[in-house]
Image (cartoon, rainbow, N blue to C red):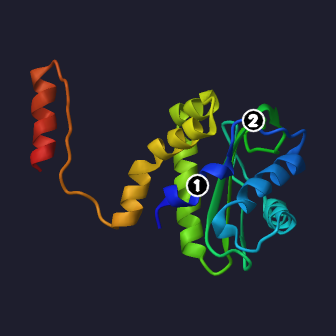
Amino acid sequence: MKLKEILDPGSCSTNLEAKNKRDAVTAMAELLAVNPAAGGASVDEIVQGLLEREKLGSTGVGGGVAIPHCRMDSMNGFALALGVCRKGVGWNSIDGRSVHIICAIAGPGDATDEHLRILAGAARVLGKGNARHEILSSDTTFAMREAFLYHLVPVTSRLEEGRRDKRKLVILVLQEEETYDRVMELFLE
């Protein structure tokens, strides 16, 4: 599964209006519900699923980011939604900061491994300061989606291929010959 396929352009918003966590979860559920993978899942079902997961522990991961997620039997496949709340929302995050970027994930109840891969991919992207900056700076939903996908590419390719390319490029600039010799010895080992 390619993660870019589950982030439907209609499931993005650059200006979520939310006064609290419940409002934000509802807005994200509305974005998830328009995704074709949502199948017959209603907005209310998705809200309930996201809030049930939230009871287990806050999905506010820090850095102004929350990744609410759930699994539901009514989902046909995985759906991902991305939203920016310019004013910020209190989320009981691990760092105590307000949340400005919300990435919601919903998928079928029997797909635990895929769910974890998607969650890990989203967390890696949103863990990067430059990715968060680009997402927050986006004026359009298209630009926001592209910024997310741009930073997702290395994660996606490793997940999809299931292997790593054996060729690597390392560039070192060393001014001391002694340090250069030690580094080269390590590579030769």
Q: Earlier in the sequence, mark 2 or mark 1?
A: 1
Percent from the top left, x then y, of residue 168? 20, 47
- Whole-number angstrom distance, CA of label 2 to CA of label 1: 17 Å
* Local SS, label 2: loop
In the foreground, 188 or 42: 42
Are there few (<14), some (14-19), or many (20+) residues within 10 Å of tag 1? many
Residue under circle 1? 7
> What is the residue that sits farthest to the top in this orientation?
175
Under mark 2, the amino acid is Asn
Percent from the top left, x then y, of residue 7? 58, 55
Percent from the top left, x then y, of residue 95? 73, 39
User: Quick check: 113 above or below 154?
Assistant: below
Residue under circle 2? 15
- Image point (46%, 43%), residue name: 151
User: Quick check: 43 above or below 11?
Assistant: below
- Image point (84%, 66%), residue name: 52
User: Quick check: 3 above or below 12?
Assistant: below
Under mark 1, the amino acid is Leu
In the foreground, 74 or 102: 74
- Image point (23%, 57%), residue name: 165
- Image point (58%, 50%), residue name: 123
* Local SS, label 1: loop
